[in-house]
């Protein structure tokens, strides 16, 4: 091959590499800018919800609704086990339906209640200022706060419900229905203990004591169901 042709090919390859490198560099810069912008938005969101006190409210909602979700699934599992007529499919369907319903109910209810309460406070402030705050930073912060609280409220029961349901997905493949019931109850009590320990940490009290108290609520629920099933 003539030298001039080789030089032309090498030059073309070099230009192609340089062009691709420039495109890649520009794309990396674009991605970096987007990541930086996203970080700023997240930081702004965090500051707004902190300023509005949404963190504490979301924390309370999380524990309350996760507790509801865990106890609801515990009741479903024990109820099916006592009746002797349930199957893993029934438990999963009932548990998933209950978790979904609690999530939607909690999320929508929390959003409506929170935004109504905050808007009332905003209107009171407008009366004193004799000025509309619609579209202001505070108005936007109210919507962000309500959204965050609703998100936490909606997700928490679904998470607490999904964990105890998991063993029933393995029935038939690796474990039996009765083993799944026992595993589900144990997981449920673990979830309750973790929630209690979290409350103990927040209140700067005994994490073990709070965890045991929450587990006790689950144990009492099981005992009540067993007692009710023994009645004629």
Image (cartoon, rainbow, N blue to C red):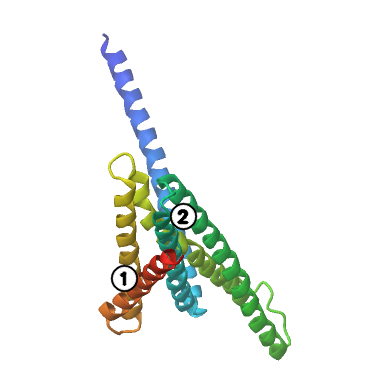
Residue 204, position in %: x, y? 31, 84
Residue under label 2, please give it: 95
Q: Quadrant of the N terminus?
A: top left
Q: CA distance from mark 2 to mark 1?
A: 20 Å
**Residue named by callout 1:** 193
Task: Using the rendered image of the protein, determine whether residue 198 is visible from the camera's viewpoint.
Answer: no
Drawn side of residue 87 relative to residue 120, left or right: left
Q: Is residue 148 left or right of residue 24?
A: right
The answer to whether residue 2 is above or below residue 167 is above
Choose top left, top right, bottom left or bottom right for residue 171: top left
Say which element carries label 2: helix
**What is the x, y in percent for residue 149?**
52, 70
- Position of residue 90 relative to residue 133, above or below, is above
Does residue 105 appear anywhere in the picture? yes
Specify whether 55 is left or right of 180.
right
Image position of 211 (left or right of 31)? left
Q: Earlier in the sequence, mark 2 or mark 1?
A: 2
Of badges 2 and 1, the one in the foreground is: 2
């Amino acid at each position: 091959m003539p030298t001039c042709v080789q030089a032309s090919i090498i030059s073309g390859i070099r230009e192609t590499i340089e062009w691709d490198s420039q495109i890649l560099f520009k794309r990396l810069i674009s991605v970096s800018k987007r990541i930086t912008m996203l970080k700023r938005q997240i930081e702004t969101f965090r500051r707004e919800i902190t300023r509005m006190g949404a963190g504490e409210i979301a924390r309370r909602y999380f524990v309350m609704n996760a507790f509801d979700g865990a106890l609801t699934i515990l009741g479903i599992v024990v109820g099916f086990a006592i009746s002797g007529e349930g199957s893993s499919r029934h438990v999963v369907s009932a548990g998933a339906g209950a978790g979904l319903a609690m999530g939607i109910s909690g999320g929508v209810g929390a959003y409506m209640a929170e935004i109504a309460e905050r808007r009332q406070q905003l209107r009171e402030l407008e009366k004193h200022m004799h000025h509309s705050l619609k579209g202001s930073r505070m108005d936007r912060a109210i919507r962000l706060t309500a959204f965050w609280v609703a998100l936490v409220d909606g997700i928490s029961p679904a998470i607490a419900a999904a964990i105890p349901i998991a063993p029933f997905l393995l029935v038939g493949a690796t474990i039996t229905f009765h083993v799944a019931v026992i595993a589900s109850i144990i997981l449920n009590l673990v979830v309750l203990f973790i929630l209690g320990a979290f409350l103990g940490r927040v209140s700067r009290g005994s994490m073990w004591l709070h965890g045991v108290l929450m587990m006790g609520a689950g144990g009492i629920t099981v005992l009540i169901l067993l007692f009710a099933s023994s009645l004629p």
